[in-house]
Image (tube, rainbow, N blue to C red):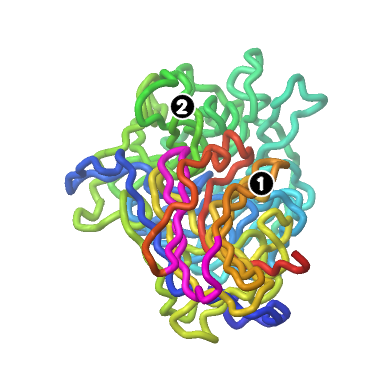
Amino acid sequence: MLLIGMAGMSARAQEPVLFDWFEYRGHDTAFEQPVSPDQYRNPILAGFNPDPSVVRVGDRYYLVTSSFGYFPGIPVYESRDLVHWTPIGHVIDRPSQLNFDGLSLSRGVFAPNIAYHDGTFYVANTAVDSGGNFIATAKNPAGPWSDPIWLPSIGGIDPSLFFDDDGKVYLLNNDAPEGKPLYEGHRAIWMQELDLAHYKPVGPRRVVINGGVDLSKKPIWIEGPRVYKREGWYYLVCAEGGTGPQHSQVVLRSRSVWGPYVPYADNPILTQRDLPEDRADAITNAGHANLVETPDGSWWAVFLASRAYDRVHYNTGRETFLLPVTWKDGWPIILPHGRAIPQIVAGPTSMQRDATQTSLSGNFSWRDGFASTTLDPVWMYVRVPKQEWADLHSHPGKLAIHPLPEGLDTLRNPSFLARRQQHLVFEASTSLTLPAQAGTEAGIASFQNEHYWYAFGAKRVGDQVVVSLLRHRGDDQALVATTVLPKETKQLKLKIAADGGAYSFAYDDGSGWKWLRRDEDGTLLSTDVAGGFVGAVVGPYARQLGNE
Protein backbone atom coordinates (compact mmCIF):
# COMPACT_ATOMS: atom_id res chain seq x y z
CA MET A 1 0.00 0.00 0.00
CA LEU A 2 1.04 3.50 -0.85
CA LEU A 3 2.30 5.27 2.24
CA ILE A 4 5.16 2.93 3.02
CA GLY A 5 8.21 4.71 1.66
CA MET A 6 6.38 8.03 1.13
CA ALA A 7 8.42 11.13 1.86
CA GLY A 8 7.76 13.22 4.96
CA MET A 9 9.28 12.12 8.22
CA SER A 10 8.06 14.63 10.79
CA ALA A 11 5.93 11.94 12.44
CA ARG A 12 9.18 10.15 13.34
CA ALA A 13 10.08 12.63 16.13
CA GLN A 14 8.13 10.54 18.65
CA GLU A 15 9.11 6.98 19.49
CA PRO A 16 6.86 4.64 17.46
CA VAL A 17 4.35 2.26 18.96
CA LEU A 18 4.91 -1.32 17.79
CA PHE A 19 1.92 -3.56 17.11
CA ASP A 20 2.61 -7.31 16.81
CA TRP A 21 -0.68 -8.32 15.21
CA PHE A 22 -4.30 -7.35 14.79
CA GLU A 23 -7.14 -9.88 14.77
CA TYR A 24 -10.80 -9.63 13.82
CA ARG A 25 -13.44 -12.35 14.34
CA GLY A 26 -17.10 -12.23 13.25
CA HIS A 27 -19.90 -14.29 14.84
CA ASP A 28 -23.25 -13.22 13.38
CA THR A 29 -26.09 -15.67 13.92
CA ALA A 30 -27.56 -14.93 10.50
CA PHE A 31 -24.28 -15.99 8.87
CA GLU A 32 -24.43 -19.40 10.56
CA GLN A 33 -27.18 -20.63 8.23
CA PRO A 34 -25.88 -23.41 5.98
CA VAL A 35 -25.30 -22.57 2.33
CA SER A 36 -25.43 -25.17 -0.46
CA PRO A 37 -22.84 -25.16 -3.28
CA ASP A 38 -25.20 -23.34 -5.64
CA GLN A 39 -26.10 -20.58 -3.16
CA TYR A 40 -24.43 -17.43 -1.85
CA ARG A 41 -24.82 -15.13 1.16
CA ASN A 42 -26.06 -11.58 1.27
CA PRO A 43 -24.50 -9.13 1.71
CA ILE A 44 -21.79 -9.96 -0.81
CA LEU A 45 -19.64 -7.14 0.62
CA ALA A 46 -20.27 -7.00 4.37
CA GLY A 47 -19.42 -3.85 6.25
CA PHE A 48 -19.42 -0.27 5.00
CA ASN A 49 -19.53 -0.62 1.17
CA PRO A 50 -22.33 1.64 -0.05
CA ASP A 51 -23.50 2.84 -3.46
CA PRO A 52 -22.22 -0.09 -5.54
CA SER A 53 -21.72 0.28 -9.27
CA VAL A 54 -20.83 -2.68 -11.50
CA VAL A 55 -19.74 -3.27 -15.08
CA ARG A 56 -19.02 -6.48 -17.01
CA VAL A 57 -16.06 -6.70 -19.36
CA GLY A 58 -15.89 -10.08 -21.08
CA ASP A 59 -16.06 -12.73 -18.37
CA ARG A 60 -15.07 -10.36 -15.54
CA TYR A 61 -17.07 -7.97 -13.40
CA TYR A 62 -15.73 -4.81 -11.79
CA LEU A 63 -17.43 -3.06 -8.90
CA VAL A 64 -16.77 0.21 -7.09
CA THR A 65 -18.30 1.63 -3.90
CA SER A 66 -18.32 4.91 -2.02
CA SER A 67 -15.59 5.68 0.50
CA PHE A 68 -16.42 9.29 1.48
CA GLY A 69 -13.56 10.74 3.58
CA TYR A 70 -11.50 7.53 3.82
CA PHE A 71 -8.27 6.99 1.92
CA PRO A 72 -7.44 5.22 -0.36
CA GLY A 73 -10.75 6.16 -1.96
CA ILE A 74 -13.24 4.35 -4.20
CA PRO A 75 -12.27 0.68 -3.79
CA VAL A 76 -12.29 -1.47 -6.94
CA TYR A 77 -13.31 -5.14 -6.74
CA GLU A 78 -13.08 -7.88 -9.37
CA SER A 79 -15.19 -11.02 -9.77
CA ARG A 80 -15.82 -13.84 -12.24
CA ASP A 81 -19.35 -14.57 -11.02
CA LEU A 82 -20.82 -11.50 -9.21
CA VAL A 83 -20.59 -13.36 -5.88
CA HIS A 84 -16.93 -13.83 -5.01
CA TRP A 85 -15.00 -10.57 -5.07
CA THR A 86 -11.34 -9.64 -4.76
CA PRO A 87 -10.15 -6.10 -3.97
CA ILE A 88 -7.69 -5.07 -6.69
CA GLY A 89 -7.07 -1.38 -6.12
CA HIS A 90 -8.50 2.09 -5.61
CA VAL A 91 -9.35 4.95 -7.93
CA ILE A 92 -8.00 7.49 -5.41
CA ASP A 93 -4.71 6.05 -4.18
CA ARG A 94 -2.32 9.02 -4.33
CA PRO A 95 -2.39 11.86 -1.80
CA SER A 96 -2.00 14.32 -4.68
CA GLN A 97 -5.37 13.39 -6.20
CA LEU A 98 -7.73 14.76 -3.53
CA ASN A 99 -7.65 16.43 -0.13
CA PHE A 100 -10.32 15.90 2.54
CA ASP A 101 -8.84 18.02 5.36
CA GLY A 102 -11.44 20.08 7.17
CA LEU A 103 -14.31 17.89 5.97
CA SER A 104 -16.63 15.75 8.01
CA LEU A 105 -15.98 12.07 7.27
CA SER A 106 -19.27 11.74 5.36
CA ARG A 107 -18.20 14.29 2.76
CA GLY A 108 -15.48 13.41 0.24
CA VAL A 109 -16.17 10.96 -2.60
CA PHE A 110 -19.82 10.00 -3.00
CA ALA A 111 -21.54 7.40 -5.17
CA PRO A 112 -19.22 6.38 -8.04
CA ASN A 113 -20.26 4.99 -11.41
CA ILE A 114 -17.95 2.63 -13.29
CA ALA A 115 -18.23 2.17 -17.05
CA TYR A 116 -16.12 0.60 -19.81
CA HIS A 117 -15.81 1.60 -23.44
CA ASP A 118 -13.31 0.78 -26.17
CA GLY A 119 -10.47 -0.36 -23.90
CA THR A 120 -10.85 2.28 -21.19
CA PHE A 121 -12.48 2.17 -17.77
CA TYR A 122 -14.25 5.30 -16.55
CA VAL A 123 -15.34 6.23 -13.05
CA ALA A 124 -17.58 9.28 -12.71
CA ASN A 125 -17.85 10.64 -9.21
CA THR A 126 -18.38 13.64 -6.95
CA ALA A 127 -15.81 15.01 -4.50
CA VAL A 128 -18.29 16.75 -2.21
CA ASP A 129 -16.96 20.02 -0.78
CA SER A 130 -13.58 19.15 -2.27
CA GLY A 131 -13.73 19.78 -6.00
CA GLY A 132 -17.11 18.72 -7.38
CA ASN A 133 -17.85 16.29 -10.19
CA PHE A 134 -15.05 14.52 -12.04
CA ILE A 135 -14.12 11.56 -14.22
CA ALA A 136 -11.11 9.28 -13.67
CA THR A 137 -9.86 6.82 -16.29
CA ALA A 138 -7.68 3.71 -16.43
CA LYS A 139 -6.68 1.06 -18.91
CA ASN A 140 -6.39 -1.48 -16.08
CA PRO A 141 -9.09 -1.36 -13.37
CA ALA A 142 -6.43 -2.24 -10.80
CA GLY A 143 -4.80 1.08 -11.66
CA PRO A 144 -3.15 3.38 -12.00
CA TRP A 145 -6.14 5.68 -12.41
CA SER A 146 -5.79 9.18 -13.76
CA ASP A 147 -6.00 12.31 -11.66
CA PRO A 148 -9.55 13.68 -11.50
CA ILE A 149 -10.71 15.27 -14.75
CA TRP A 150 -12.98 17.98 -13.39
CA LEU A 151 -16.41 18.86 -14.77
CA PRO A 152 -16.83 22.43 -13.48
CA SER A 153 -20.04 23.10 -15.39
CA ILE A 154 -21.85 20.13 -13.81
CA GLY A 155 -23.30 20.75 -10.36
CA GLY A 156 -25.02 18.32 -8.03
CA ILE A 157 -23.92 14.76 -7.30
CA ASP A 158 -24.04 11.16 -8.59
CA PRO A 159 -22.75 11.51 -12.16
CA SER A 160 -22.88 8.50 -14.47
CA LEU A 161 -21.96 7.81 -18.08
CA PHE A 162 -24.05 6.10 -20.75
CA PHE A 163 -22.46 4.97 -24.03
CA ASP A 164 -25.12 4.65 -26.72
CA ASP A 165 -24.94 2.37 -29.77
CA ASP A 166 -24.45 5.33 -32.14
CA GLY A 167 -21.22 6.38 -30.43
CA LYS A 168 -22.68 9.24 -28.44
CA VAL A 169 -21.92 9.52 -24.74
CA TYR A 170 -24.25 11.02 -22.16
CA LEU A 171 -23.62 12.34 -18.68
CA LEU A 172 -26.43 12.05 -16.14
CA ASN A 173 -26.55 13.34 -12.58
CA ASN A 174 -28.67 14.56 -9.70
CA ASP A 175 -28.99 18.33 -9.28
CA ALA A 176 -31.45 20.98 -8.16
CA PRO A 177 -34.60 21.25 -10.28
CA GLU A 178 -35.30 24.09 -12.66
CA GLY A 179 -36.56 27.10 -10.76
CA LYS A 180 -37.22 27.07 -7.04
CA PRO A 181 -37.54 23.64 -5.36
CA LEU A 182 -41.16 22.92 -4.44
CA TYR A 183 -40.33 21.12 -1.17
CA GLU A 184 -37.44 19.77 0.89
CA GLY A 185 -35.73 16.98 -1.03
CA HIS A 186 -37.10 18.07 -4.42
CA ARG A 187 -34.34 17.19 -6.90
CA ALA A 188 -34.05 16.43 -10.59
CA ILE A 189 -32.13 14.14 -12.92
CA TRP A 190 -30.29 16.04 -15.63
CA MET A 191 -28.65 14.77 -18.82
CA GLN A 192 -26.18 16.27 -21.27
CA GLU A 193 -24.08 14.90 -24.12
CA LEU A 194 -20.36 14.54 -23.38
CA ASP A 195 -17.49 15.19 -25.78
CA LEU A 196 -15.43 12.22 -24.63
CA ALA A 197 -12.29 13.27 -26.48
CA HIS A 198 -12.07 16.45 -24.41
CA TYR A 199 -14.23 15.46 -21.41
CA LYS A 200 -16.44 18.46 -22.03
CA PRO A 201 -20.23 18.51 -21.74
CA VAL A 202 -21.72 19.84 -24.99
CA GLY A 203 -25.14 20.81 -26.22
CA PRO A 204 -28.21 21.42 -24.11
CA ARG A 205 -28.46 20.18 -20.54
CA ARG A 206 -31.99 18.95 -19.87
CA VAL A 207 -34.09 17.64 -17.00
CA VAL A 208 -35.22 14.08 -17.73
CA ILE A 209 -36.90 13.49 -14.34
CA ASN A 210 -38.35 16.26 -12.20
CA GLY A 211 -38.72 15.24 -8.56
CA GLY A 212 -39.29 11.53 -9.11
CA VAL A 213 -41.75 9.14 -10.66
CA ASP A 214 -44.78 11.17 -9.46
CA LEU A 215 -44.14 14.83 -8.58
CA SER A 216 -47.66 15.20 -7.11
CA LYS A 217 -46.61 12.86 -4.26
CA LYS A 218 -43.55 15.02 -3.47
CA PRO A 219 -40.96 12.27 -3.80
CA ILE A 220 -37.59 13.09 -2.27
CA TRP A 221 -33.98 12.68 -3.34
CA ILE A 222 -34.23 11.21 -6.81
CA GLU A 223 -30.56 10.27 -7.38
CA GLY A 224 -28.07 7.69 -8.60
CA PRO A 225 -29.30 7.74 -12.23
CA ARG A 226 -28.26 4.95 -14.60
CA VAL A 227 -29.38 4.36 -18.20
CA TYR A 228 -29.50 0.85 -19.72
CA LYS A 229 -30.59 -0.11 -23.23
CA ARG A 230 -32.49 -3.32 -23.90
CA GLU A 231 -34.61 -4.38 -26.89
CA GLY A 232 -34.92 -0.83 -28.18
CA TRP A 233 -35.90 0.69 -24.83
CA TYR A 234 -33.88 3.09 -22.74
CA TYR A 235 -34.35 2.32 -19.06
CA LEU A 236 -33.62 5.04 -16.51
CA VAL A 237 -33.09 3.47 -13.10
CA CYS A 238 -32.78 5.71 -10.04
CA ALA A 239 -32.85 5.69 -6.26
CA GLU A 240 -35.67 7.57 -4.54
CA GLY A 241 -36.73 8.29 -0.97
CA GLY A 242 -33.38 9.07 0.68
CA THR A 243 -30.78 6.66 2.00
CA GLY A 244 -32.68 5.67 5.17
CA PRO A 245 -35.59 3.25 5.74
CA GLN A 246 -37.70 4.93 3.00
CA HIS A 247 -35.03 4.22 0.39
CA SER A 248 -36.20 2.58 -2.84
CA GLN A 249 -35.35 1.95 -6.48
CA VAL A 250 -37.55 3.10 -9.35
CA VAL A 251 -37.47 2.63 -13.11
CA LEU A 252 -38.76 4.58 -16.11
CA ARG A 253 -38.35 3.90 -19.83
CA SER A 254 -38.45 5.60 -23.21
CA ARG A 255 -37.85 4.85 -26.88
CA SER A 256 -35.58 7.91 -27.01
CA VAL A 257 -32.54 8.52 -24.86
CA TRP A 258 -33.84 12.04 -24.14
CA GLY A 259 -37.27 10.79 -23.13
CA PRO A 260 -39.96 11.41 -22.23
CA TYR A 261 -39.44 8.68 -19.65
CA VAL A 262 -42.59 6.90 -18.50
CA PRO A 263 -42.50 5.36 -15.00
CA TYR A 264 -43.29 1.72 -14.32
CA ALA A 265 -46.82 1.48 -12.96
CA ASP A 266 -45.77 -0.79 -10.08
CA ASN A 267 -42.75 1.17 -8.81
CA PRO A 268 -40.68 0.80 -6.73
CA ILE A 269 -38.85 -2.24 -8.05
CA LEU A 270 -36.92 -2.57 -4.79
CA THR A 271 -37.61 -1.38 -1.25
CA GLN A 272 -37.99 -2.67 2.30
CA ARG A 273 -40.08 0.21 3.62
CA ASP A 274 -43.32 -1.77 3.30
CA LEU A 275 -42.25 -4.47 5.79
CA PRO A 276 -42.96 -4.62 9.55
CA GLU A 277 -40.36 -2.77 11.62
CA ASP A 278 -40.21 -5.57 14.20
CA ARG A 279 -39.24 -8.32 11.75
CA ALA A 280 -36.36 -10.60 12.71
CA ASP A 281 -32.93 -10.05 11.13
CA ALA A 282 -34.20 -6.88 9.51
CA ILE A 283 -32.50 -5.58 6.38
CA THR A 284 -33.37 -1.97 5.70
CA ASN A 285 -32.41 1.09 3.61
CA ALA A 286 -32.47 -0.90 0.34
CA GLY A 287 -31.85 1.05 -2.85
CA HIS A 288 -29.23 2.62 -5.12
CA ALA A 289 -29.23 -0.38 -7.45
CA ASN A 290 -27.07 -1.00 -10.52
CA LEU A 291 -28.02 -3.60 -13.13
CA VAL A 292 -25.72 -5.86 -15.14
CA GLU A 293 -26.30 -8.53 -17.79
CA THR A 294 -24.38 -11.80 -17.60
CA PRO A 295 -23.09 -13.73 -20.63
CA ASP A 296 -26.04 -16.14 -20.44
CA GLY A 297 -28.51 -13.27 -20.81
CA SER A 298 -29.69 -13.12 -17.20
CA TRP A 299 -29.72 -9.82 -15.32
CA TRP A 300 -28.61 -9.06 -11.78
CA ALA A 301 -28.67 -6.07 -9.48
CA VAL A 302 -26.16 -4.91 -6.90
CA PHE A 303 -27.55 -2.44 -4.37
CA LEU A 304 -27.01 -1.09 -0.90
CA ALA A 305 -28.88 -2.09 2.24
CA SER A 306 -28.23 -2.28 5.99
CA ARG A 307 -28.54 -5.07 8.53
CA ALA A 308 -30.29 -3.60 11.56
CA TYR A 309 -30.54 -4.57 15.22
CA ASP A 310 -33.18 -3.25 17.62
CA ARG A 311 -35.11 -2.14 14.53
CA VAL A 312 -33.24 1.10 13.82
CA HIS A 313 -29.53 0.68 14.57
CA TYR A 314 -26.93 -0.44 12.05
CA ASN A 315 -23.26 -0.11 13.00
CA THR A 316 -22.04 -1.88 9.87
CA GLY A 317 -23.38 0.94 7.73
CA ARG A 318 -24.69 0.40 4.22
CA GLU A 319 -23.43 -2.78 2.58
CA THR A 320 -23.50 -4.30 -0.92
CA PHE A 321 -26.16 -6.91 -1.72
CA LEU A 322 -26.91 -8.93 -4.86
CA LEU A 323 -30.22 -10.20 -6.27
CA PRO A 324 -31.41 -11.55 -9.64
CA VAL A 325 -33.52 -9.31 -11.87
CA THR A 326 -36.64 -10.66 -13.52
CA TRP A 327 -38.27 -9.00 -16.51
CA LYS A 328 -42.05 -8.59 -16.45
CA ASP A 329 -43.82 -7.13 -19.47
CA GLY A 330 -40.59 -5.40 -20.46
CA TRP A 331 -39.83 -4.02 -16.98
CA PRO A 332 -37.01 -5.08 -14.61
CA ILE A 333 -38.07 -6.25 -11.14
CA ILE A 334 -35.50 -6.75 -8.39
CA LEU A 335 -37.85 -7.72 -5.54
CA PRO A 336 -41.65 -7.93 -5.43
CA HIS A 337 -43.42 -5.63 -3.00
CA GLY A 338 -43.62 -6.85 0.59
CA ARG A 339 -40.83 -9.40 0.25
CA ALA A 340 -37.81 -9.32 2.55
CA ILE A 341 -34.33 -9.35 1.06
CA PRO A 342 -33.13 -12.96 1.32
CA GLN A 343 -29.81 -13.63 3.04
CA ILE A 344 -29.26 -16.88 1.12
CA VAL A 345 -29.86 -16.86 -2.63
CA ALA A 346 -29.38 -19.22 -5.57
CA GLY A 347 -26.36 -17.93 -7.45
CA PRO A 348 -25.78 -17.18 -11.12
CA THR A 349 -25.20 -20.12 -13.43
CA SER A 350 -21.53 -19.13 -13.64
CA MET A 351 -21.04 -19.07 -9.87
CA GLN A 352 -17.90 -20.81 -8.63
CA ARG A 353 -19.21 -23.65 -6.50
CA ASP A 354 -15.96 -24.33 -4.66
CA ALA A 355 -15.12 -20.70 -3.78
CA THR A 356 -15.65 -18.93 -0.47
CA GLN A 357 -16.98 -15.44 0.22
CA THR A 358 -14.56 -15.05 3.14
CA SER A 359 -13.46 -12.48 4.18
CA LEU A 360 -15.99 -10.22 2.51
CA SER A 361 -19.08 -11.99 3.82
CA GLY A 362 -20.06 -14.69 6.30
CA ASN A 363 -18.43 -15.48 9.63
CA PHE A 364 -14.65 -15.66 9.60
CA SER A 365 -11.45 -14.93 11.49
CA TRP A 366 -8.88 -12.56 10.01
CA ARG A 367 -5.42 -11.83 11.36
CA ASP A 368 -2.74 -9.44 10.17
CA GLY A 369 0.69 -10.38 11.47
CA PHE A 370 2.30 -7.46 9.62
CA ALA A 371 4.74 -9.80 7.87
CA SER A 372 4.53 -7.96 4.55
CA THR A 373 6.27 -4.76 3.52
CA THR A 374 2.99 -3.27 2.33
CA LEU A 375 -0.20 -2.78 4.28
CA ASP A 376 -3.04 -5.20 3.63
CA PRO A 377 -5.67 -3.53 1.39
CA VAL A 378 -8.23 -3.96 4.17
CA TRP A 379 -6.71 -0.98 6.00
CA MET A 380 -7.93 2.58 5.46
CA TYR A 381 -6.83 6.02 6.62
CA VAL A 382 -9.20 8.65 7.97
CA ARG A 383 -8.77 11.36 5.33
CA VAL A 384 -5.65 11.72 3.22
CA PRO A 385 -2.34 11.35 5.12
CA LYS A 386 0.27 14.02 4.54
CA GLN A 387 3.26 12.08 5.85
CA GLU A 388 4.42 8.55 6.51
CA TRP A 389 3.34 7.33 9.92
CA ALA A 390 2.39 3.69 9.21
CA ASP A 391 5.70 1.82 8.91
CA LEU A 392 6.34 -1.87 8.12
CA HIS A 393 10.04 -1.47 7.31
CA SER A 394 11.83 -0.22 10.42
CA HIS A 395 10.75 -3.18 12.60
CA PRO A 396 10.14 -6.17 10.30
CA GLY A 397 7.16 -8.27 11.37
CA LYS A 398 5.57 -5.39 13.27
CA LEU A 399 3.46 -2.37 12.48
CA ALA A 400 5.16 0.79 13.72
CA ILE A 401 2.76 3.69 14.18
CA HIS A 402 4.59 6.99 14.57
CA PRO A 403 2.10 8.99 16.63
CA LEU A 404 0.68 12.27 15.40
CA PRO A 405 -0.71 14.94 17.73
CA GLU A 406 -4.18 14.72 16.19
CA GLY A 407 -6.82 12.82 18.14
CA LEU A 408 -9.77 10.93 16.69
CA ASP A 409 -11.85 14.11 16.82
CA THR A 410 -9.65 15.87 14.27
CA LEU A 411 -10.82 17.01 10.84
CA ARG A 412 -7.39 16.08 9.52
CA ASN A 413 -5.62 12.72 9.48
CA PRO A 414 -5.10 10.98 12.85
CA SER A 415 -2.56 8.15 13.21
CA PHE A 416 -5.30 5.53 13.23
CA LEU A 417 -5.62 2.57 10.84
CA ALA A 418 -9.20 1.49 10.21
CA ARG A 419 -10.78 -1.73 8.97
CA ARG A 420 -14.49 -2.14 8.41
CA GLN A 421 -16.71 -3.61 11.12
CA GLN A 422 -18.40 -6.37 9.12
CA HIS A 423 -20.51 -8.06 11.79
CA LEU A 424 -23.05 -7.17 14.45
CA VAL A 425 -21.23 -9.59 16.77
CA PHE A 426 -17.46 -9.43 16.60
CA GLU A 427 -14.19 -9.31 18.50
CA ALA A 428 -11.20 -7.20 17.54
CA SER A 429 -7.91 -7.46 19.40
CA THR A 430 -4.30 -6.40 19.14
CA SER A 431 -0.96 -6.78 20.90
CA LEU A 432 1.36 -3.81 21.31
CA THR A 433 4.63 -2.89 22.96
CA LEU A 434 4.26 0.17 25.14
CA PRO A 435 6.74 2.96 24.44
CA ALA A 436 9.30 3.38 27.19
CA GLN A 437 8.75 7.13 27.27
CA ALA A 438 5.76 9.14 28.40
CA GLY A 439 3.87 11.38 26.03
CA THR A 440 2.22 8.71 23.86
CA GLU A 441 -1.11 6.94 24.10
CA ALA A 442 -1.79 3.86 21.98
CA GLY A 443 -4.42 1.20 21.67
CA ILE A 444 -7.48 0.18 19.71
CA ALA A 445 -10.48 2.26 18.66
CA SER A 446 -14.04 1.70 17.47
CA PHE A 447 -14.91 4.66 15.29
CA GLN A 448 -17.91 5.98 13.36
CA ASN A 449 -16.82 9.54 12.67
CA GLU A 450 -14.93 12.36 14.34
CA HIS A 451 -17.76 12.89 16.87
CA TYR A 452 -18.67 9.28 17.72
CA TRP A 453 -16.04 6.78 18.88
CA TYR A 454 -14.43 4.78 21.65
CA ALA A 455 -10.67 4.92 22.23
CA PHE A 456 -9.29 2.11 24.41
CA GLY A 457 -5.63 2.70 25.08
CA ALA A 458 -2.68 2.90 27.45
CA LYS A 459 -0.07 5.51 28.37
CA ARG A 460 2.73 5.97 30.89
CA VAL A 461 1.99 8.43 33.69
CA GLY A 462 4.85 8.82 36.14
CA ASP A 463 5.84 5.36 37.32
CA GLN A 464 2.55 3.76 36.25
CA VAL A 465 0.85 2.51 33.13
CA VAL A 466 -2.72 3.78 32.87
CA VAL A 467 -5.25 1.91 30.73
CA SER A 468 -8.28 4.05 29.91
CA LEU A 469 -11.51 3.98 27.93
CA LEU A 470 -12.56 7.28 26.37
CA ARG A 471 -15.99 7.81 24.83
CA HIS A 472 -16.90 10.57 22.40
CA ARG A 473 -20.61 11.06 21.72
CA GLY A 474 -21.46 14.21 19.82
CA ASP A 475 -20.12 17.13 21.83
CA ASP A 476 -19.74 15.03 24.97
CA GLN A 477 -16.38 13.42 25.70
CA ALA A 478 -16.13 11.24 28.81
CA LEU A 479 -13.49 9.16 30.52
CA VAL A 480 -15.50 5.99 31.06
CA ALA A 481 -13.04 3.91 33.09
CA THR A 482 -9.36 3.53 33.97
CA THR A 483 -7.09 1.01 35.61
CA VAL A 484 -3.44 1.15 36.66
CA LEU A 485 -0.79 -1.42 35.72
CA PRO A 486 2.75 -1.80 37.10
CA LYS A 487 5.38 0.43 35.53
CA GLU A 488 7.25 -2.72 34.41
CA THR A 489 4.44 -3.49 31.96
CA LYS A 490 5.86 -3.50 28.46
CA GLN A 491 3.50 -5.71 26.46
CA LEU A 492 -0.26 -5.30 26.41
CA LYS A 493 -3.17 -6.91 24.61
CA LEU A 494 -6.42 -5.03 24.12
CA LYS A 495 -9.78 -6.34 22.91
CA ILE A 496 -13.15 -4.91 21.89
CA ALA A 497 -16.08 -7.35 21.83
CA ALA A 498 -19.46 -6.26 20.49
CA ASP A 499 -22.93 -7.77 20.42
CA GLY A 500 -25.30 -5.44 18.60
CA GLY A 501 -25.36 -2.29 20.70
CA ALA A 502 -23.32 -3.65 23.63
CA TYR A 503 -19.56 -3.06 23.43
CA SER A 504 -17.12 -4.51 25.97
CA PHE A 505 -13.45 -3.73 26.53
CA ALA A 506 -10.79 -6.08 27.93
CA TYR A 507 -7.02 -5.98 28.51
CA ASP A 508 -4.30 -8.56 29.15
CA ASP A 509 -0.99 -7.49 30.72
CA GLY A 510 0.34 -11.05 30.71
CA SER A 511 -1.84 -12.37 33.50
CA GLY A 512 -4.93 -13.17 31.42
CA TRP A 513 -7.85 -11.19 30.04
CA LYS A 514 -9.69 -8.81 32.37
CA TRP A 515 -12.73 -6.71 31.51
CA LEU A 516 -12.32 -3.00 32.08
CA ARG A 517 -15.94 -2.28 31.10
CA ARG A 518 -18.73 -4.43 29.79
CA ASP A 519 -21.87 -3.64 27.83
CA GLU A 520 -21.12 -0.01 27.09
CA ASP A 521 -23.51 1.77 24.74
CA GLY A 522 -22.51 0.84 21.19
CA THR A 523 -25.50 2.48 19.55
CA LEU A 524 -23.46 5.68 19.38
CA LEU A 525 -21.51 3.90 16.64
CA SER A 526 -24.69 3.33 14.60
CA THR A 527 -25.48 5.52 11.62
CA ASP A 528 -28.90 6.48 12.92
CA VAL A 529 -27.27 8.03 16.01
CA ALA A 530 -23.99 9.32 14.56
CA GLY A 531 -25.50 10.51 11.27
CA GLY A 532 -23.71 10.55 7.95
CA PHE A 533 -23.25 7.83 5.37
CA VAL A 534 -20.39 5.65 6.62
CA GLY A 535 -20.21 2.58 8.88
CA ALA A 536 -18.22 1.75 11.98
CA VAL A 537 -14.57 0.75 11.73
CA VAL A 538 -12.05 -0.62 14.21
CA GLY A 539 -8.26 -0.58 14.34
CA PRO A 540 -5.02 0.40 16.08
CA TYR A 541 -4.11 3.99 16.90
CA ALA A 542 -1.41 6.06 18.58
CA ARG A 543 -1.21 9.75 19.37
CA GLN A 544 1.12 12.29 20.89
CA LEU A 545 -0.22 13.67 24.16
CA GLY A 546 1.56 17.00 24.14
CA ASN A 547 1.27 18.67 27.54
CA GLU A 548 -1.37 16.33 28.95
Which span is picked out in magenta? 484-509
Mark carried by residue 209: none
Q: Quadrant of the C terminus?
A: bottom right
> Residue drawn 43% across and 39% down?
500
Residue under numbered circle 1: 478
475 relative to 406, above or below: above
The x, y position of residue 528, in whole percent, is 58, 34
Q: Secondary structure at mark 1?
A: strand
Q: How many marks?
A: 2
430 relative to 50, above or below: below
The x, y position of residue 32, in whole percent, is 25, 43
Q: Secondary structure at mark 2?
A: loop
Front residue of this view, candidates 496 and 301: 496
Q: Along the horizontal axis of the image, is 280 left or right of 491?
A: left
Residue 191 in magenta stretch:
no
> Residue drawn 47% across and 85% down?
396
In space, the residues marked 2 and 1 are separated at their CA atoms by 27 Å
Q: Amino acid at mark 2?
A: Arg
Q: Along the horizontal axis of the image, is 436 left or right of 157?
A: left
Residue 501 in magenta stretch:
yes
Q: Amino acid at mark 1?
A: Ala
Q: Residue furthest left?
A: 36
Q: Can I make out residue 120 in this image?
A: no
Dominant secondary-structure state across the stretch colored magenta: strand
Mark carried by residue 311: 2
Front residue of this view, candidates 191 and 20: 20
The x, y position of residue 309, in whole percent, is 43, 33
